[in-house]
Amino acid sequence: MSVATCPPLQRTTQPDFIDEMSIDMRFIPLMAIAASLAVTPVASHATSLHTHWEQYKAGRAFRHLSNDGQKAFGDILKARDLLAAGNTDAAIPALYDANKRLTAAGKASTKFKAAEASLQPAPQHAPAAGHVPATTPTDWIPVGGELIASETLAPEKKAAVATANKQLQAGDTQQAAQSMQVVGEDVDFIVALAPLAQTQGALNRATVFTEGRQPKEALDALDQTLSNLVFVSQDFVETAIPATQGGKAASTPKAKK
């Protein structure tokens, strides 16, 4: 992601939807950066500032993710694994949890209404096979994300990106942000959006089928929740969910010394 301008950075508190993650991150004030540049070698000025800015963007990128939405899809994946393994009864609590968390995500501010045709899907992640586009405006929930590394990144930095993606999939935004501290450049962040009504409908069907001991039909319904996902760029989500709507800006990890 290219850097055009450097907007003012402010000290902020954590957004409500990631309070329980207890992310210990703060913005790096521009005055502090200026002070540090005054006592460091000239050759390191651009690199240091760029690293701080990329770390700011990493924290900013995660702030729009729905905590409840992430957990709901974690529950969906857990239920799917249990159903696929033949543990139908064990999948029921996970489906109940997914329903509750998806309902909570729908009431939070980290959502927006739009027609799917206006979403501008990210070229790095095509829709799943069997994806059926929503034809009317619907509420979208940011339920996950993926970091896309540049081919020019060093192997150790690509490994850090892979680690951060696994942590994001587990809903561990704090650890993902920490893992990204060693990267600091040439990484795009794309966001997985779930259509709320369609996802709730498929999840309800999966729950009914599971309660009725029909695991195949339940799996088909859960697969629909996954194929409904649309991946868009971080910039698109920031436009769709302004800071005033999505909550206070998330903090950024401290730079390693």
Image: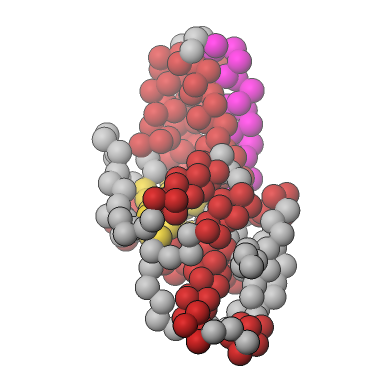
Indicate the position of residue 72 as horizontal and vertical percent values: 57, 38
For the point 45% across and 47% down, which residue is it? 159
Left or right of residue 119: residue 252: right
Q: Of helix, strand and loop, which mostly describes the magenta segment? A: helix
Task: Please say if 233 is above or below 100.
Answer: below
For the point 27% across and 34% down, which residue is it? 130
Residue 110 visible from this viewpoint: no
Residue 31 colored in magenta in the image:
no
Left or right of residue 203: residue 38: right
Residue 189 visible from this viewpoint: yes
Q: What range is drawn magenta here?
A: 87-106
Task: Please say if 166 is above or below 216.
Answer: below
Count of numbered circles in the view:
0
The N terminus lies in quadrant: bottom left
For the point 60% across and 20% down, which residue is it? 92
For the point 60% across and 55% down, which residue is it? 178
Colour scheme of this structure image? secondary structure
The C terminus lies in quadrant: bottom right
| Residue closest to the eye, 139 or 8 | 8
Indicate the position of residue 220 as horizontal and vertical percent values: 38, 23
Indicate the position of residue 23 as horizontal and vertical percent values: 69, 56
